[in-house]
């Protein structure tokens, strides 16, 4: 064991001495050696040249690592600029979305100018198989009350069923508990449109036996029932289902409002 340790130490010493000799030889000017020394120099020269090449290689690596550091710095600067551009793009998209919302409000206000309205955002949705309720960001502080009608640019949305100081809950016309007294726009036939479970369509029932329904006919609120004003678009006839008993026939109504993408609404505060 001690012999192995001694051999290892001796090897390290020899390597150190050789490195010192190589360093000295690398700085010797071979041209100034004497004739005798020149012969020795012929032996040393290849070693000297190799050592010089090694030094140059190390110097080159220093430059390489410097370049890598500079590239990393430039990369970080580019990432920062990209992040700034992405942030600016997001802010622009937000501004565009706000402008779109303002235009929607303006269109709604002009379209329903005969009503006094309060604009609102949808801030929550409970759209499931059993309930199709939305929550809007206006409430008692803005004069919102239960049973007020809620509309969108495309048509009827629903009515307010509960209110807090700053929010209101709206039962949409596609909720299975909803019922809207309506008219067929072409024939003025009276029908009732009800929400359907598991669907965003409505079902028209209580259809008069002599009513002539046509697919594509528009359905509007009749003004009956004490909640919805007259003449607001509910949807259009999508399908007519005839049964053995004509008194039981019904129609599928496609809602005028796309509830999956709905974001802005108006609450009618007067009738």
Image (tube, rainbow, N blue to C red):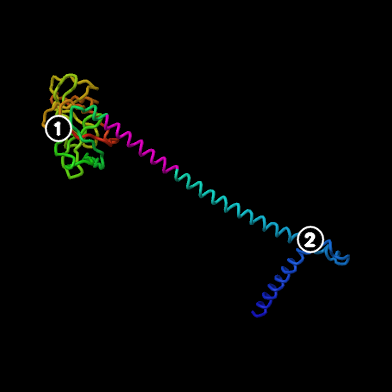
Residues in magenta?
85-106
Residue 140, compared with residue 6, is above or below; it is: above
Cα separation, mark 2 vs mark 1, equals 103 Å
Residue that appears at 19% across and 30% down? 203
| Extreme-right residue of the structure | 35
Residue bearing mark 2: 46
Residue that appears at 18% across and 40% down? 142
Question: Which of 142/134 is in front?
Answer: 142
Q: Relative to residue 1, is residue 241 drawn left or right?
A: left
Q: Position of residue 240 (x, y in %)?
A: 21, 24
Mark 1 element type? loop
Q: Position of residue 141 (x, y in %)?
A: 18, 42
Mark 2 element type? helix
Q: Quadrant of the C terminus?
A: top left
Magenta stretch contains residue 99: yes
Disc 2 or 1, which lies upstream in sequence? Answer: 2
Q: Position of residue 107 (x, y in %)?
A: 27, 29
Q: Quadrant of the N terminus?
A: bottom right
Residue bearing mark 1: 270
Magenta stretch contains residue 224: no
Q: Is most of the magenta stretch helix, strand or loop?
A: helix
């Amino acid at each position: 064991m001690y012999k192995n340790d001694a051999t290892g130490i001796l090897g390290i010493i020899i390597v150190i001495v050789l490195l010192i000799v190589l360093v000295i030889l690398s700085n010797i000017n071979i041209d100034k050696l004497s004739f005798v020394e020149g012969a020795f120099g012929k032996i040393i020269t290849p070693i000297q040249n190799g050592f010089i090449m090694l030094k140059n290689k190390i110097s080159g690596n220093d430059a390489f690592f410097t370049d890598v550091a500079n590239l990393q710095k430039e990369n970080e600067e580019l990432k920062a600029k990209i992040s700034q551009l992405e942030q600016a793009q997001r802010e622009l998209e937000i501004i565009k979305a706000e402008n779109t919302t303002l235009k929607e409000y303006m269109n709604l206000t002009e379209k329903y100018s005969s009503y006094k309205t309060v604009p609102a955002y949808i801030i929550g949705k409970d759209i499931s198989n059993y309930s199709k309720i939305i929550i809007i960001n206006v409430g008692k502080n803005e004069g919102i009350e239960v049973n007020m009608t809620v509309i969108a640019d495309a048509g009827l949305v629903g009515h307010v069923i509960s209110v807090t100081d700053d929010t209101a809950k709206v039962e949409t016309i596609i909720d299975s508990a909803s019922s809207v007294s309506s008219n067929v726009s072409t024939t003025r036939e009276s029908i009732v449109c009800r929400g359907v479970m598991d669907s965003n369509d409505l079902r028209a029932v209580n259809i008069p036996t002599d009513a002539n329904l046509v697919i594509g006919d528009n359905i509007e609120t009749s003004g009956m029932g004490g909640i919805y004003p007259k003449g607001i678009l509910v949807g259009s006839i999508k399908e007519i289902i005839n049964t053995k008993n004509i008194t039981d026939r019904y129609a599928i109504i496609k809602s005028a409002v796309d509830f999956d993408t709905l974001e802005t609404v108006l609450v009618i505060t007067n009738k």
